Amino acid sequence: MAKTAPDQQFSNFSRAGRLKASFRKRLHVRLHALGDGLISFVRRTVEIMCGLVMLVMTILLLPLAALVSGPQNTLRLDREVAGRWGRRFRIYRLGLPKWPIIRALSGLPIGLNLVRGDLALVGPRPLELSEIRNIPPAAFRRFDVRPGVAGLFLLRKQANVAFDSEFSTDAEYIETSSLGADAGVLARYMSTAWLGKTEATDAPSHIHVLGLTIDNLTMSEASDWIVKAAEGSEQKRACFVNADCGNITFSSRDYLEAVSQAHLVLADGIGMRLASKMLRQPVVENVNGTDMFPRICERLSSSPTGLYLLGGKPGVAEEVAAWVRKNYPQVTISGYRDGYFKPEEESAVIEEIRNSGAGLLLVAFGAPRQDLWIDAHLAELGVGVAVGVGGLFDFYSQRISRAPQWMRELGIEWMYRLYQEPRRLWKRYVVGNFMFLARVTRYRESHPYIK
């Protein structure tokens, strides 16, 4: 049947619309490809330039390497690693002794790997061949990109905040990678390089700071300990100590004894990291309650052990309980209440906690009150483990926002907290941090065996 004039006109309009849509789609694809190509070009140009600078520095250091290590070990091939698409290559290094000052210089020949395209400036860590057989199939996506001299996981490892697995961090990097993001990772990596990386195998099981003995555990180990203690029949205490806590021990003998007698003491914050470095007892990870809380909730999801939340302003603990129910619905919330109760109400609060059947009690009164209160009433509370968690409730009730990830990686989360509450926190951070480091310096001088 022949088309009428209106039908023919409609058909023409439809065809024109389809052609325009097809053109826009092709244009979008080509512009996207052009943008990707431009970004790749910029990346490679920067990598080659950096690689050439490193090679020039390598040439200048060759006489020193030959003098120290002998001509045969001046420039040597390091371990064989797997690069993009699993291609094998070796990393070049200078034969210099591993002295702290010149340790980084021995890696300058890696510039040749940059120029050749074996490595990128930023990417996942190059894996040794023996490691490949142990990675899960889902992690093979990391071989879609070139390994890097610096990387997101290496940055977090260096900053002691690498709480997630390396492969999950690699997946996060691949999902969020961009030219700007890579520049940020590289800048933060270089800014924290002086701290160095601490491997669990190299760290002591305990560190001693200003009379405090701290359990040197990873985030995962500490989370497991707390949940296991919550499920047990023996009552235990755990606490976090930061630079402010270290200062408080000088004015409160009771607080020092309460922390010293706790079953688990964990290092929290950049202050403790710096102190451990000064005392040559490296902290393996920044084990803080705010980052630990979701990991504890995840473990409690498969446990019948109940959780009780005590502390904060009226309504805050309730909001934290709501956060747990939303994100970890299988966790048993045994109860919650604010920390603003009168002395005559204390016995009723203790009885409520004991009757709740909770195995884990989180107390957010702030230091030193929370740890002194737990120490005084642990036997009455009936819980497996009680933990002082400071300002954790404020973050998970969203009363106070957490510092951006990049600030945590740089170890300057305290600056963000100072910005949020300058009147309340200026003395703790502006004066207290320097006072703490001065005390650690005097402590080191009075203990010559740690120099």
Image (cartoon, rainbow, N blue to C red):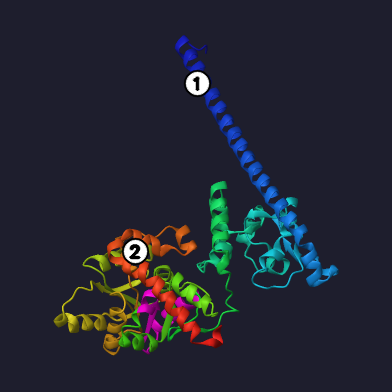
What's the mark number on residue 395?
Answer: 2
Instruction: Return the residue found at the far top.
Output: 5
Residue 385 pos. (x, y %): 36, 83
> 307 and 247: which one is in front?
247
Q: Residue at x 56, y 51 (%)?
A: 183
Task: Give the x, y percent position of residue 218.
Answer: 51, 75
Q: Earlier in the sequence, mark 2 or mark 1?
A: 1
Asked if the magenta segment contains residue 356, the reply would be no
Q: In what element is the residue under mark 1?
A: helix
Marks 2 and 1, how far apart at CA: 55 Å
Query: Badge 2, how many Cα within 10 Å: few under 14, some, many 20+?
Result: some
Task: Identify residue type, mark 1.
Answer: Ser
Instruction: Please determine whether, in this image, residue 47 is positioned above or below residue 351.
Output: above
The one of 100 and 184 positioned closer to us in this rendering: 100
Q: Is residue 20 above or below residue 396?
A: above
Q: In the image, is residue 133 above or below residue 19? A: below
Give the magenta range.
Answer: 219-247
Callout 2: SS: helix
Q: Which residue is mark 1?
A: 14
Badge 1: residue crowd in 10 Å (few <14, some 14–19, many ≥20):
few
Amino acid type of the residue that numbered disc 2 sits on in the rendered structure: Phe
Give me the residue at 49% from left, 73% from top: 274
Left or right of 196? Residue 427 is left
Spot occupied by residue 116 in the image (x, y as percentages of width and height): 75, 51
Instruction: Examine the rendering and report whether any part of residue 391 can be seen.
Output: yes
Which quadrant of the rendered structure holds the C terminus? bottom right
Residue 340 falls left or right of residue 451: left
The residue positioned farthest toward the left in the image shown:
344
